[in-house]
Image: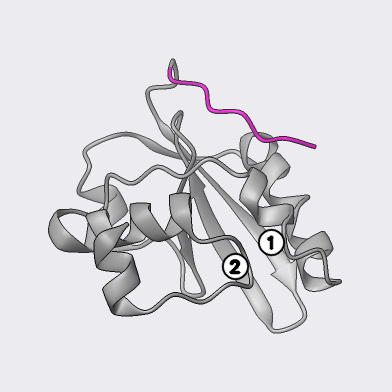
Amino acid sequence: MTVTADQTTTDLAVGRAATPVGTLHLVVSGAGLLSVSWSGVRPAVTRLGLPVVFDPDRVRPVVDLIPASIEGDRTALEQIPVDWRLTSGVTLTVLQTLHREVPFGSTITYGDLAVA
């Protein structure tokens, strides 16, 4: 299953996923997965000024990939588009570079990351 981004949505969908170590709270936007938390919707999400709605159906494609990841399919989560808007500056640059350039299970030095 591939999770697709839908840029036409104007709100943020919230849902939950039960895992062996607790309940994850997920927020999905039209661009992709925006937030994952153990403790509910993060304050930064509400500061975006978009309506936040409980919509398990919109979050379901992400929730459905979590068991595969827990059971050992380490590439399952790579199918999820990421909404980067809660990150900025150097942190955004580093995370996007890691996401784009470093395959799952690989390592990279800070020096090599800087070159990428």
Q: Residue furthest left?
A: 89
- List x then y, in percent, for residue 2: 72, 35
The amino acid type found where label 2 is placed reads Leu
- List x then y, in percent, for residue 39: 46, 74
Residue range in magenta is 1-7
- List x then y, in percent, for residue 47: 20, 49
Is residue 30 positioned above or below 85 on the image?
Answer: above
- Residue under the point 34% across and 34% down: 51
Q: Dot 1 surroundings within 10 Å: few (below 14), some, or many (20 or more)?
A: some
State which quadrant residue 109 falls in.
bottom left
- Residue under the point 40% across and 30% down: 11
Residue 45 vs residue 112, the one in the foreground: 112
State which quadrant residue 49 falls in.
top left
The amino acid type found where label 1 is placed reads Ala
- List x then y, in percent, for residue 100: 45, 49
The span from disc 2 to disc 1 (Cα, nearest Å) is 5 Å
Q: Name the residue under label 1.
A: 17
Query: How many numbered discs?
Result: 2
- Element type at mark 1: strand
Circles 2 and 1 in contact, beta carbons < 8 Å: yes
The dot on residue 24 is: 2
Is residue 13 positioned above or below 70 on the image?
Answer: above
- Element type at mark 2: strand
State which quadrant residue 20 falls in.
bottom right
* Quarter the N terminus occupies: top right
